[in-house]
Image (cartoon, rainbow, N blue to C red):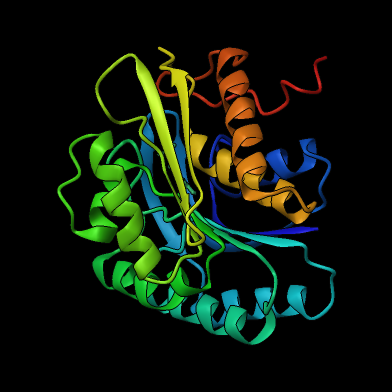
Amino acid sequence: MIVAIGGSDPSGGAGIQADIKTITVFGGYAAAVITALTAQNTLGIAGVVAVEPSFVGQQLELVLTDLPVAAIKIGMLHSAAIVREVAAVLESLAFGIPIILDPVLISSSGTPLLDNPGIRALCQLLLPQAALVTPNLPEARLLTGLDIQSGDDFGLACDHLLAGGAAAVLIKGGHLEGDTVVDYLRTGEGLEYRHRAPKLTSQSTHGTGCTLASAIATLVGEGRTLADAVAQGHAFVHQAILEAHPMGKGIGPLNHLCQLAR
Ligand code: PLP
């Protein structure tokens, strides 16, 4: 079973809702620890109410002390206090369980989802526990402080995050100009992998980061190698965008169920 830790998206495209759907279609059993409720739809985020940090910790502790957890996926954490709480519980109860850390810092519509003290706490306390961290370009800039301008800078940014304690780093290049999206995976053991795909023009990309990280967590929990899990996660997200049914007035959800349709 896979534990997703993150925020609720009532429109169902991102956050915990995307995590549960993705883990389920990959054949995993999804457990969910909620850190915050957002009020949002495809047009953006209108409000956030955080869960009491100690209650986030209590949810996580009860899941980890009872259920057979194969992997943990972390998404939106909202505040430094929640980061600290989650990090402390993981440190005492998640030894040996792979942690896939999606550093959710800012929504694509521009709403900050983790404040600056939270970013510092994440780098200090969660990065060293992560089997993989999966920033997109703006998140990689915020986490490293580096002025990443092109794919050529990804290696340096990866090294920065590996030096910060992550066991592996996947930088998602979808925000770069050009017709091709290049994602870059580098592990602490020196494995390097570039994933190239044609950039899709689509209005259905809300929650791609959550979905990719949940797919990777489920596959890693099954015992796949990181490189395999990342490659299969990419293929799934690509297909889920291609087969999305346009929904809402803004940026709509992927079709998480595209594999079931076959
Ligand atoms: N809401 C929640 C709860 C999330 O976890 C995330 C992203 O991870 C978002 C919103 C933002 O999703 P997007 O930037 O794809 O719109």
Quarter of the image with the C terminus in it = top right
Residue under the point 39% across and 29% down: 182
Residue under the point 57% across and 63% down: 131
Residue under the point 84% across and 69% down: 68
Expressed as whole percent of the image width and height from the top left, the position of residue 158 reads: 35, 53
Q: In this view, does 146 lie to the left or right of 189?
A: left
Residue 85 higher or lower than 171, as above or below: below
- Whether residue 111 appears in this view of the structure is no
Residue 260 higher or lower than 93, as above or below: above
Q: In which quarter of the image is residue 244?
A: top right
Q: Is residue 158 left or right of residue 41?
A: left
- Whether residue 71 appears in this view of the structure is yes
Give the total of numbered labels.
0
Residue under the point 60% across and 82% down: 89
Q: Which residue lies furthest to the bottom in this view?
A: 92
Query: For this rendering, which residue is in front, 165 or 39?
Result: 165
Q: Is residue 34 left or right of residue 122?
A: right
Query: For this rendering, which residue is in front, 150 or 17?
Result: 150
Expressed as whole percent of the image width and height from the top left, the position of residue 30 reads: 76, 53
Q: Quadrant of residue 199?
A: top left
